Image (tube, rainbow, N blue to C red):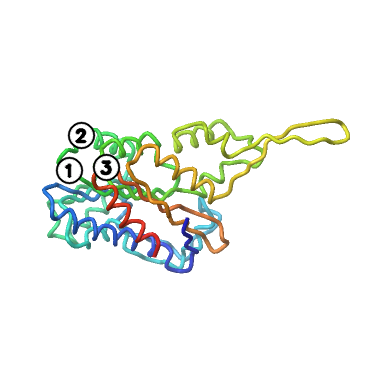
Amino acid sequence: MAKQVFGGNWTEDKLNRVRKYLGAYATIMNKYNFYYAYIDAFAGTGYREIKETEDKDTLLFPEFSDIAVQKFLDGSARIALQVKPRFNKYIFIEKNESKASELNQLRIDFPEFNNDIVIVNEEANKYLKDLCLKDWKYHRAVLFLDPFGMDVKWNTVELIAQTKAIDLWYLFPIMGVNRLLKKDGNIEEVNRNKLNEIFGTTDWYETFYQVRGEQNLFGFYSFTEKTVDGKSIGQYFIDRLKTIFEGVTENPLLLYNSCNSPLFLLCFAAANKKGAKTAIKIAQDILGK
């Protein structure tokens, strides 16, 4: 599992890796008779904007204040529109109405794509469910899942795999998961349900915790103990992806903050059996750089 320590260009590095894949993907797909799209499930405004004066106490994850060195970046939406060869369609999903409205600026800034940009103001899981259930025989896509929190449900990921047509880049929230895993295993029901939804199973508990026993002055007693760290959580998720996708990269990129705490896992999975070998080879090369 590769490691990327945060150092100023962390967010840009992540997006540049996706940019490289989009260019390689479009070059290959341009030779075939498929209608192919780029899908961004959490498009935001099209920009990545971090305020340097962000108050750590107001952040969901205070560690993200490290990203303040990146004041203003092109988001994944704008990066996709700059890739050549171009995609046939660009679908940008954003559930926040005001942010979705701001995405209309893309049509002004990229007028040549005006008729091929679709802006969807809807919750990502709901829209992707409907989209994945369509006929994908003559269609292909690259989907970028870059949620801030734990917004992606496993049943959505399953539907993506079942299309047999979508290549998936997923920025999996390692820190978000790890924060819910109490050391003593006493996890509130609402948080257990969140973890069940993101992993698509309840088996994670037996994997992440062990019951141990000790002898003391008053006799033998047992207790539950957390036995995983960010890296092993990431490996568990990769193993879950392997149960439903045709191919999954073996070298996902762990993204760390300046305190050496893992934040996200940038991973890749290919749903199409015929194209998976090539897709994985390209993605693994990009992730390994």
Which numbered disc flags the more N-terminal residue, 1 or 2? Answer: 2
Tally of marks: 3
**Image location of residue 246, percent across then percent down:** 32, 42
Do the residues under discs 1 and 3 have CB atoms within 8 angstroms?
A: no
Do the residues under discs 1 and 2 have CB atoms within 8 angstroms?
A: yes
**Residue at the location (34% across, 41% down)?**
245
Eye-nearest disc, 2 or 3 = 3
Question: Which amino acid, by three-letter code, is at mark 3?
Answer: Lys
Residue bearing mark 1: 139
Residue bearing mark 2: 134
Which numbered disc flags the more N-terminal residue, 2 or 3? Answer: 2
Position of residue 33 relative to residue 75, above or below, is above
**Image location of residue 9, percent across then percent down:** 42, 67
Question: Real-space Cα distance between discs 2 and 3?
Answer: 18 Å
**Image location of residue 196, percent across then percent down:** 48, 33
Q: Give the secondary structure at mark 2.
A: loop
Residue bearing mark 3: 273
Which numbered disc flags the more N-terminal residue, 1 or 3? Answer: 1
Left or right, 178 with respect to 100, comes to: right
Position of residue 177 relative to residue 190, above or below, is below
Eye-nearest disc, 1 or 3 = 3
Other-residue count near label 2 (Cα within 10 Å), few / some / many at <14 / 14–19 / ≥20: few
